Amino acid sequence: MTSVSLRGDHRAVSVRLPNGTYADFPALFLRDNCATGFHPQTLEREFDLTSVPAGISISSAEIEGNELVISWATEDLQSRYTLDWLCAHTPGKTMTDPASVEPIVWRGDLQKNDLPRAAASDLLSNDAALLEFLIATKKTGLAIVEGMADDVDAGMTVARRIGFLRETNFGVTFEVMSKPNPNNLAYTSHALPLHTDLPNQELAPGFQFLHCLANEAQGGGSTFADGFAIAEDLKTLDREAFDLLAKTPIPFRFQDGEYDIRKHHTVIQLDHFGTVSEVRFNAHIASVFDMPADQMDAYYRAYRTIMAMTRDPAYVMTTKLNGGEMVIFDNRRALHGRAAFDPSTGFRHLRGCYVDRGEFDSRIRVLARGVEAAKAA
Amino acid sequence: MTSVSLRGDHRAVSVRLPNGTYADFPALFLRDNCATGFHPQTLEREFDLTSVPAGISISSAEIEGNELVISWATEDLQSRYTLDWLCAHTPGKTMTDPASVEPIVWRGDLQKNDLPRAAASDLLSNDAALLEFLIATKKTGLAIVEGMADDVDAGMTVARRIGFLRETNFGVTFEVMSKPNPNNLAYTSHALPLHTDLPNQELAPGFQFLHCLANEAQGGGSTFADGFAIAEDLKTLDREAFDLLAKTPIPFRFQDGEYDIRKHHTVIQLDHFGTVSEVRFNAHIASVFDMPADQMDAYYRAYRTIMAMTRDPAYVMTTKLNGGEMVIFDNRRALHGRAAFDPSTGFRHLRGCYVDRGEFDSRIRVLARGVEAAKAA
């Protein structure tokens, strides 16, 4: 049975919610979220919080049907909140988010066949299939799309089903193949040790889409490692190294004739809750470390420790992409690399683009909305 | 006189630099930055730091002309570093950066005529003028371009001289005018209290370009405030509020038929050094606060305090943009808003786009490179 009582000088209400728990809702919180304060079309808040006093108080609070009805002591206004809304927005509880997916970490024994996998045609035509695949891809941070059209734009077409493309100094899309006068090691035939792309940007690109158009050269196998697994193990095995990597910003820098993009970042990024949210590892564009000399030995020890983990078969899975396959990975979690290849033995061409995490998550939420609506219908 | 000595078991060198200061350079730091380890064209590091032992030591260190020459005890290699390089990369010292500009904060008494101002034609044709203007714009976070072509693409043309445009869910460019079925309050004729755009994104857009094509309606004056000035004063006047705003993430959210983009952020963002690097204030898309109920009163007090500052004439400058002017501001520092206007009295049309801070700073560095080269020639 839902019940309600005024608390703390009428400056909060305590509600017994339908699930049996009691929750406190402060008066200012309720006033700030009164439906009358929002624009009906844009859903944006137009209410001016400074138009009411800080000490706003409630004159009465009642349950009517499935709504909490508040009258205000200081204002001629009735505010209504559904019990569903109160459950969803109980203070101290993060709102349910279809895009909030717990990562499933993996290590070097992961096989290509174990990865989430979908056919391009399904992703392009079927919202439910796309939703399921996006959630699976968020869990592992690495997935395969098969049956890609033999068309240089096919990767972009799938990526754009998810969100607009994140442009970078390398363009909206980029061609991974051996080129004359390369401005990036990816555009050579050299081996690329495991790395994440563009940590020199303030926000490194989120999900990377690499469509394999041809992979006929000898060599050129792909490598991947789960940065979250590495960080998790490092935290257990060597807490001092983990803390240094999570607390010490180092400079990253890319420069060519047109750009000079620099940023200090930590190698391990923790979110507001202290959870690892990102790994940045790219020895190619790590710039000259600039911590004081007396901190360098300790930092180099930590940095070499995580670097060694990125080369350890315990963490590195090796596979070969086939023409017609596209790999998708969270560039802020999964490291990627490749073996050297011999361009005289055959053509190797991957075409890449990025969709940031924000747009990726937004697509999950909007697709989930559609699936919920279909269920309700 | 430059001199050099080995220290700490040959695991570092101490160098007396041409400016008379002594600096220590650890062996691993020098080895990691030996020029032989970098790709000659991409300038990226190919050297594998794990290929040398952690305890690497130096057999000899000498000054030859303007170079430090190191021979390694553990490797048959000679490494050379110019004294200029050693000065620039002394551990503990941040590398010189032409884009590192100290902000000059401003308050409500700032006049439009006091702002950095340049003619579009100069910015488009003259690199030195562009460089000077970009640095001035970084200092104030707000500037005016005049003499814009009467062309809806004129703003993009100037913005693209600086960097590629940051796409968002509102497009690569956006039209600020009264529209039917708006998905954003900017697209109504309502007043817009001061705010920063898109704090619901993981990385809010950096510099915003608003080209005023027509401003003939009654009302519609523009307002600006310097978020850095507000944060600076808040820190002095009410440290508790400042700390709460800098430490408590709150949810931001934008949703419409196509998108649902959410992110928790603090209102005040501090960088690695504890300096205010960003202010996020947007009451329209602040979502439902989710801190525990017993923290809400304190947080609302802090939030209302900064909100009141954004409405205080001490901080708010009011001006009216004329057709043919474009305002540029750092959206992560300067708040912007407008008075309501009456669309029946005349047309008001602004066209906007964004260039992120990373590309803005990169353009300053590349232009500065050109100016240096011209000086040297």
Image (cartoon, coloured by chain):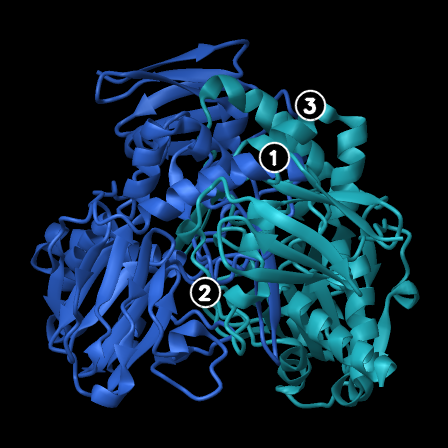
Chain colours: A blue, B cyan
| In front: label 2 or label 1 | 1
Give the x, y percent position of residue B251. Answer: 47, 41
The picture places residue B226, in percent across and down from the top left corner, at 77, 51
Q: Chain of mark 3?
A: B
Tag 1's secondary structure?
Answer: loop
Query: For mark 1, what is the residue?
Result: B9
Q: Earlier in the sequence, mark 3 or mark 2?
A: 2
Is tag 2's residue or tag 1's residue first in the polypeptide sequence?
A: 1
Check disc 2 and report the residue beneath it: B46
Amino acid at circle 2 = Glu
- Residue B352 x, y percent position in the rendering: 61, 73
Q: Nearer the viewer, residue A37 or B55?
A: B55
Horizontal side of residue A45 vs B61, given as left or right: left
Asked if the residue under mark 1 is in contact with the one under mark 2, i.e. CB atoms within 8 Å, the reply is: no
Which sits earlier in the primary sequence, circle 1 or circle 3? 1
- State the mark number for residue B240: 3
Disc nearest the viewer among 1 and 3 = 1
What's the chain of the residue with tag 1? B
